Image (cartoon, grey):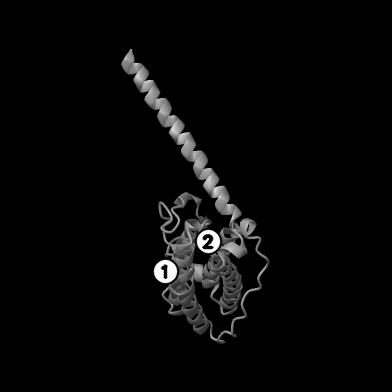
Amino acid sequence: MDTIVLLVAVVAGLVALELLGMRAYRRHRARKQAAFTRENVGAVYDDLQAARARCLAEKRAFALLADAARSAGRPEDGAVLDALAAGERAHLAALEAFRGPLHAESVDPAAYPSLPSSLDDALRVAAGRLDDWSTGACRDAAARARVRGYRDIAKLYRQLQEVEQAAACLCLDIAEDARPAGLFSLCPACGLVVAGRRPAFCTVCTKPGFEFDDVAMPAMPEAAAAVLKPEGVA
């Protein structure tokens, strides 16, 4: 009987400690949110603003490249570039999650220099720009957020780094006519574009693969389909 009473007391104590810990954590989060202002976070705020402006500009750049690809008779490349633009929209949605505590004003995208007239050269320029940002400014912003204790923001930047580096590789593949054949899918959470079979989980944000969005590839023209159709097939 004494053993049962002791066990009950231990369990009750553990539950009480857990409840107290949860309350303390919530108070800590509330204080941190209250302190999340431009005056208090300084560079972290400016980094988020710059990241949002950059994502807006990249979204528009990918949309222009997609239109250029379709105009050049490369509709499948256009579909993949549209998916990369959708990935930038996913980045913007993630950054918008901080706009409430940030009270961030709208930021116009940075004015990029005019792109080369050649689509492939423009894709190479875009790949270099994505790689430079992901390995430079984005990495530095993640470090500043981590040092100031904003681990959730640092994690977001790390995800942006991985997704943008993958997008840079895909742009180079398209420019070099080495784009993987077959289907593509898009992670709606982090914006990663994946070629081939859907993964079981996103390699960047761990979202389940069954929640990925298929990239709608254009239908093959009838003339090309007739050439590829095996003999004897109606």
Residue receiving disc 2: 215
Q: Residue furthest right?
A: 105
Residue 163 shown left or right of residue 70 in the figure: left
Q: Is residue 65 visible?
A: yes
- Reading the image, the residue beneath label 1 is 180
**Residue 177: where, in percent of width, then height?**
44, 77
| Type of amino acid at the residue the image marks with label 1 | Pro
Residue 176 or 150: which is nearer the viewer?
150
In contact (CB < 8 Å): disc 2 and disc 1: no
Sooner in the amino-acid sequence: mark 2 or mark 1:
1
Q: Which x, y percent locates residue 107?
A: 65, 70
Give coordinates of residue 112: x percent, y percent. Answer: 59, 81
Does residue 194 sit above or below 12 in this rendering?
below
Rate crowding at label 1 as few (under 14), some (14 to 19) or many (20 or more) other CA atoms within 10 Å.
Answer: few
Pinpoint residue 90: horizontal percent, then vertical percent. Answer: 56, 61
Residue that protrudes farthest toward the bottom in the picture = 117
Q: Circle 2 sits in a helix, a strand or a loop, which is it?
A: loop
**What residue occupies the far left of the structure in this picture?**
3
Badge 1 element: loop
Separation of marks 2 and 1 at Cα, in angstroms: 13 Å
| Residue drawn 46% across the image and 39% down it | 21
In the rendered structure, find residue 53 and report the number of the disc placed on it: none
The number of discs equals 2
Quarter of the figure that contains the N terminus? top left
Residue depicted at x 56% and y 76%: 69
Classed neighbour count for the residue bearing mark 2: other residues with Cα under 10 Å, few (<14), some (14–19), many (≥20): some
- Drawn side of residue 192 relative to residue 64, left or right: left
Q: Nearer the viewer, residue 155 or 90?
A: 155
Tell me the residue at 63%/74% (across/down): 109
Amino acid under disc 2: Val
Kindly tell me whether residue 229 is visible in this rendering: no
Please state which of residues 21 and 62 is positioned toward the viewer in this rendering. 21
